Image (spheres, helix red, strand yellow):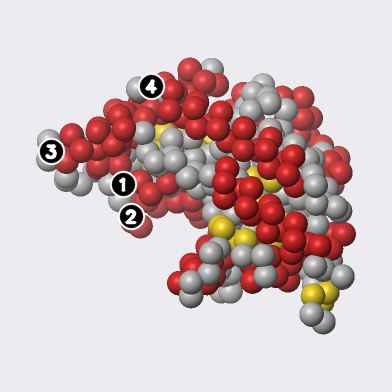
Amino acid sequence: MALSESATLAMSQKSRELQAQGLDIINLSVGEPDFNTPEHIKNAAIKAINDNMTHYTPVPGYPELRKAVAARLKRDLNLDYDFSQIIVSAGGKHSLANVILCLINKGDEVIVPAPYWVSYVELVKLAEGVNVEVSAGIEQDFKITAEQLEKAITPKTKMLILNSPSNPTGSMYSREELESLAAVLRKHPNIIVLSDEIYEMIAYDQKHVSMAQIDGMKERVVLCNGLSKGYAMTGWRCGYIAAAPEIVKACNKLQGQFTSGICSITQAAAIAALTESDEPSRKMTEQFKQRRDMMLGLLAEIPGLKMTTPPGAFYIFPDVSAYLGKSFNGKKIANSNDLALYLLTEGHVATVAGSAFGIEGYIRLSYAASEDKLRKAVENMKVAFANLK
């Protein structure tokens, strides 16, 4: 089976290699907050260690943590889940892998709106499923329409993957847009919606809405989330799903054979994150919004770039097609991957090519970096773009 390497991780590795050579690389390719985990969460982990909370954990997670997840879903989304409908895994990616491996069989079709997060299509390949990519460019704010969804469905369709707020675009589906997709899905009751909501807490201009909140959809939605982005807990590895009992039971069985329960100390930290103050997360989101607005203003000074104003996550996904076909020192920039490599080697700014996310003519910029670094990065990019002829 030919699995592709994660393009985002590959670009991070290339950046580190150039940094090791002494180059000052500004890394805008990373999908993680540049903030440290809040103190009260770290203190809960330290206490767990001192209390010898160091033994094997239940496969689906401690009941206290699963109850905290259920309480949070009730508080924030008014969704009722029993804690038995929650399973905790080693990060959102692990949660997604569990669900896809449990639900997708050889030949099953999975509708994946593009641009998409890099691992979706690889996980479907791993399950021997068939990716059906539905492209949504900047002209439709990177969101598929009900008409596109209807056209993509066949008798083999088993799943639709939705990601809102989106990586790589920051776009968010409104309630009305989800209602229109749900109207199509109601005609096809066998299709499961895998709703990746990992950026839920990082939303600025509109309120996050889950497909599980749409009438009649909850039992068909696997809600996937985690603590990496909203709580600056990327290295702790804690994700979870909320789903119908039979799906959770299957994921529990699979996880029991692959990894068993996740780290006990991580779970103690996660309980504190979900049950104590969200103030650090709110402040982090406020800073991301300031950076987004600053970045959009600076990028607007580069001729030819086309952008939306993303209402969530911490990415900007500009259309760079105006620069494709241009050259530098006789070398042609044929596609977004060439452009990303050019910006890295000549501009010393690490980005990720749109092709990694299933759509050509774009690059992804993460603004999870200090304002000084972001200003310097855009200045470098402005020069690099201007040198393309």
Q: Which residue is mark 4?
A: 277
Q: Could you tell me the amino acid type at mark 1?
A: Ile
Q: Secondary structure at mark 3?
A: helix
Q: Could you tell me the amino acid type at mark 3?
A: Asn
Closer mark to the observer between disc 2 and disc 3: 3
Q: Secondary structure at mark 2?
A: loop
The quarter in which the N terminus is drawn is: bottom right
The percent position of residue 237, horizontal first and vertical second, equals 38, 47
Q: Could you tell me the amino acid type at mark 4?
A: Ser
The quarter in which the C terminus is drawn is: bottom right
Q: Is residue 366 left or right of residue 239?
A: right
Sequence-earlier tag: 3 or 1:
3
3D distance between C-alphas at marks 4 and 3: 23 Å
Query: Which residue is situated farthest in the bottom direction here?
Result: 330
Q: Which residue is mark 3?
A: 50
Answer above or below: position of 268 versus 209. below
Q: Secondary structure at mark 1?
A: loop
3D distance between C-alphas at marks 2 and 3: 25 Å
Which residue does the image show at 16% across and 45% down from the upper left?
Answer: 55
Question: Which mark, residue 259?
Answer: 2
The percent position of residue 305, horizontal first and vertical second, equals 82, 51
Q: Nearer the viewer, residue 127 or 292?
A: 292
Q: Which residue is mark 1?
A: 262
Q: Are marks 2 and 1 in contact (CB under 8 Å)?
A: yes
The percent position of residue 266, horizontal first and vertical second, equals 30, 42
Sequence-earlier tag: 4 or 1:
1
Q: Could you tell me the amino acid type at mark 2?
A: Thr
Q: Residues within 10 Å of mark 4 (few under 14, many from 20)?
A: few
